[in-house]
Amino acid sequence: MDSPSAISAATVGVPQHKISIGGAQRAQVISEVLPYLRRWHGQTVVIKYGGAAMTDDNLKAAVMGDIALLHYAGVKPVVVHGGGPEISAMCQQLGIEPQFVQGMRVTDPETMRVTEMVLGHIGKDIAQGLTTAGAPAVGLSGKDGGLMVAKKFQGEADWGLVGEIEDVKPSLLHTLSREGFVPVVTPVSPGADGQTYNINADLAASAIAQSLEAAKLLLLTDVAGIYRDFQDKSTLIQQLKADEASELIAAGVVSKGMIPKVRCCVEAVRGGVKRAHIVDGREPHSILMELFTDAGCGTMIYED
């Protein structure tokens, strides 16, 4: 979105079966992407992968291809994934009734075992999908190489083994990126107390992006971005300062499930990430539109 040259968002990443362009037109589109490639080459981009983009096969294929393209363009993508619906489905299959308080999963030891198993499986599937798309990837969790350390989340209720990140040591992520691999992080982390904690994927992505001093944090969601009035789709906000985003939360304009996502973006840009974006993951190739067009695909939050 904050890009040096204009290019039509409608022409980037459009599936070939939807639009047919000649060789000269294709070459023109590719040439217009050059300023963006120069801008993002060598930069780290953290992508929180979740929502419809994980469950719709066509969207999933598009995301895998987009991340592979970034990899070959010299960008350093790091993927952090969620998997709430899959965890709930497995819990129900095992006779464990999912419980939520204030939108957060109550995680007892049995649910934690299911969570770690399901998220680990999802992470390996994503790594395989990226590798198949041409971007060699490695799935890991906060337990690997001392990547993350967590502590029990303290709030108005007791959510059990739900944690918040105390520290991220990104050396393993740097090593994988330097050796040509895309890290795929499962948001499960050990604590100093020996417990294993379930970490909200948005929070994990924000903390990892800060530790890497990433150029961008992209949260793939099932909404188009932040609205001043959710009922009026013409009020979509394309750019928003961190202070203004916090004010929208305080005023109740940002509510429900969007609150933690916006807070993660605010924390990220205040913690050294250059730009944080809430991106519409239901839009095919939304990652490419965000990085390689002026229009972008969602709401950008920045500090200055």
Image (tube, helix red, strand yellow):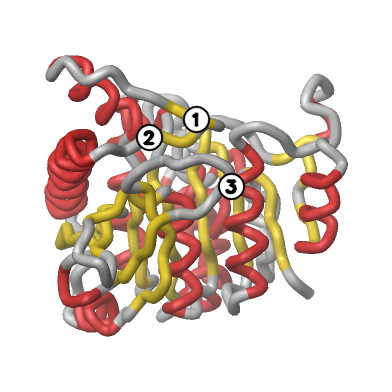
Q: Is residue 24 visible?
A: no
Task: Please tell me which residue is depicted at 31% across the width and 65% down the height of the picture.
Answer: 71
N-term-proximal mark, 2 vs 3: 2
Front one among 17 and 103: 103
Local crowd size for mark 3, using a 10 Å CA cut-off: few (<14), some (14–19), many (≥20): many
Image quarter for residue 189?
Answer: bottom left
Going from N to C along the chain, the mark reached first, 1 or 2, is 1
Tell me the kind of residue under disc 1: Val
Mark 2–mark 3 Cα distance, whole angstroms, equals: 19 Å
Which type of secondary structure does the marked residue at label 2 adopt? Answer: loop
Residue 300 position in % (x across, y down): 68, 55
Type of amino acid under label 3: Lys
**Given contact means CB atoms under 8 Å apart, are the residues at marks 1 and 2 in contact?**
yes
Residue 242 is tagged as none
Question: What amino acid type is highlighted by mark number 2?
Answer: Val
Q: Secondary structure at mark 3?
A: helix
Label 1 and label 2: CA atoms lie apart by: 7 Å
Disc 2 residue crowd, few under 14, some 14–19, many 20+, Cα 10 Å: many
Residue 102 lies, with reference to residue 97, above or below; the image says: below
Relative side of 15 to 125, left or right: right
Instruction: Identify the residue at image location x=28%, y=66%.
Output: 191
Q: Is residue 60 above or below residue 135?
A: above
Q: CA distance from mark 1 to mark 3?
A: 17 Å
Is mark 1 in CB contact (under 8 Å) with mark 3?
Answer: no
Residue 106: numbered disc? 2
Instruction: Specify whether 44 is left or right of 218.
Output: left
Residue 77: quadrant of the picture: bottom left
- Residue appearing at x 50%, y 30% in the figure: 101
Q: Identify the residue position indicated by label 3 in the image.
A: 261
**Mark 1, residue position:** 101
